[in-house]
Amino acid sequence: MLNRIFVSKPSLGVGFTDAGRAEINLWAPYASKVSLDLPERGITLPMEKGNFGYWWINTDKLKQGDLYQYVLDDDKKRPDPVSVSQPQCVNGPSRALDVCRYDWQDTAWTNPPLAEYIIYELHVGTFTPEGTFAALEEKLDYLKELGITAIEIMPVAQFPNSRNWGYDGVYPYAVQDSYGGAVALQHLVDACHDKGLAVILDVVYNHMGPEGSVFNDYGPYHTKKYCTPWGDAINFDDEWCDGVRHYFTENALMWFRDFHVDALRLDAVHHLKDFSTNHILREMKQCVDKLAAETGRQYYLIAECDLNDPVFIDPLEKRGYGMDAQWCDEFHHALRVAIGEPRNGYYVDFNGVNDLAKAFQDGYVYDGQFSKHRKKMFGAKAETNPGQQLIVFSQNHDQIGNRMLGERSNELYSNETAKLMAGAVLVSPFLPMLFMGEEWGETNPFLYFVSHNDPELVEQTRQGREGEFADFQQEGDVPDPLADDTFQRSKLQWQLLDKEEHQAFFQYYRTLIALRKEHPALRNLNRWQMIITQNVAQSLLVMHRWEGDEHLLCLMNFSHDTQSATLPARNRRWRRQLDSADTAWCGPGTSTPEYATGTATFLLQPQSMVLYTSML
């Protein structure tokens, strides 16, 4: 007996009845005639035309595992835009697969509250030597040992060949075949839940990959009303937009309903152009809430947004779009400038520890003031949004991979600086996110890589990447994004964990995460129970957080010199919980006392942080 807890059924693509008949629903308003073609069986079946551009067929000729495609107007053979499997890559026929029939074992799983998420972003193809879902499963115990509670998987939508970040995915419903395909992803999610790990899946709804896309043969998936960095925008508010909106909302529901993922991270939602009365994100949230009510499970929608506009994360009842959380790039930018990053590009807007203090306190650094980089007034205040709605990090796939040489933080800065940055993220009153390998000080870069087939697209990609860095004074050539070596150099080196320095780094992260879970003043994400003070001359930040009887102090020295610091709270006895300079983490040695009373003054090592707690 199959264990099915999901009661909603997909309304697009291929589904199978209990009797084994295939029910197919296709949106193709441009076509005047549509047929279902079964190339392995030599059968072509006409489909019936319904309302609003939909076509339908119920047949016993299509079986599980069969290849199929559609014939539009007698002359265009095209893969299914709702394909869940593309075994012959993006240009080949689709494979019929009933993802609703996976035998799930996770009925006891409960998605934890978002405030408990400690996120680990990873790329399936470079996380392990094999680059598969099955190989990733073998590392779940390691992630549990580190203290991770949620993994975030970069996009898995089918892309050309086997090398891609995932943001060039062509079929949003199809799971990358070289990673293992749809069933292997379901097995991975099942295994994660068995280990107590939530799963976030990165999805791309702002564009579709350039190679192998057949969508505009079916209908107006794009509109010329708006231009995006990838060309014409996805059609969310122009003629025939209802079918497009249905396509993407159903995709979100599929990942929750049929793959049991716990959260979706929506890529660059500021490029979703929609002036409808009900924004596509609001509609998506409404549909997800309805599914949650049906299944009794909690799902989260997380936005990547570059607008500093709380409307994206405000709840539906406040006329917001209802996203549960968003990535907070400005925390990253302020942190990088605080540790000495040159103020080039968007970093020109940030001013060291002052802006980092504001990021800790307010989330958004720019909430209505003039931005030099954008050359306009920018942002709005997120005054009522709790800490769990902002995800912060010291590095991620973009911030590493969009550098010319893909350097990670520990390649750009000293180990002491890297530990300080990690500490700033993990003591924040926000959701922390790590990027794969940072916890052991991975030395391999994370480069930009693709594996297109189209010669013209190959050349455009190479020229575009070189043009991106034409104005930068950097030595060396831009790594070829099409080269297999570029991809191979981006793989993690798990053997580094056997070396003392890298193992010490791992233990430092593990300890920080454990402290975050153990201490209520860190675990609670009430960002209003916090006081931040800064000393610009010393490049020093002091964070005071509290929850109930517990108070916590974190002193962060961003300068390259030893600094004198004074505890700000009187009448308390403090106990040191961690000093990033400790020799246990291969540091120069702590200069702070294990116990301190009242307003004690002591020295902080350069580029270090120390954590104290106190109970009444």
Image (cartoon, grey):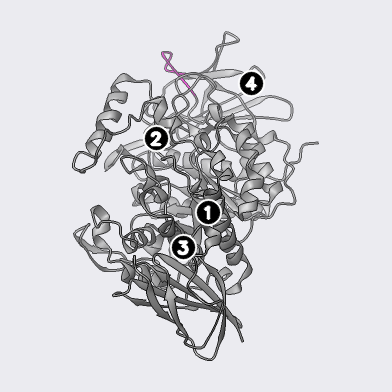
Residue at which label 2 appears:
208
Can you see residue 9? no
User: In the image, which disc is placed on residue 588?
Assistant: 3
- Marks 3 and 2: which is nearer the front? 3
Closer to the chain start, of discs 4 and 3, is: 4
Q: Is residue 75 magenta?
A: yes
User: In the image, which disc is placed on residue 505?
Assistant: 1
- Marks 4 and 1: which is nearer the front? 1
Closer to the chain start, of discs 3 and 2, is: 2
User: Separation of disc 3 and disc 1 at Cα?
Assistant: 14 Å
Q: For the point 60% across and 24% down, which residue is it? A: 96
Residue at which label 4 appears:
65
Q: Which range is magenta?
A: 71-79
Q: Position of residue 349 (x, y in %)?
A: 25, 62
Q: Give the position of the N terminus as an image quadrant.
A: top right
Amino acid type of the residue that numbered disc 3 sits on in the rendered structure: Pro
Q: Quadrant of residue 165?
A: top left
**Is residue 410 shown above or below 384?**
above
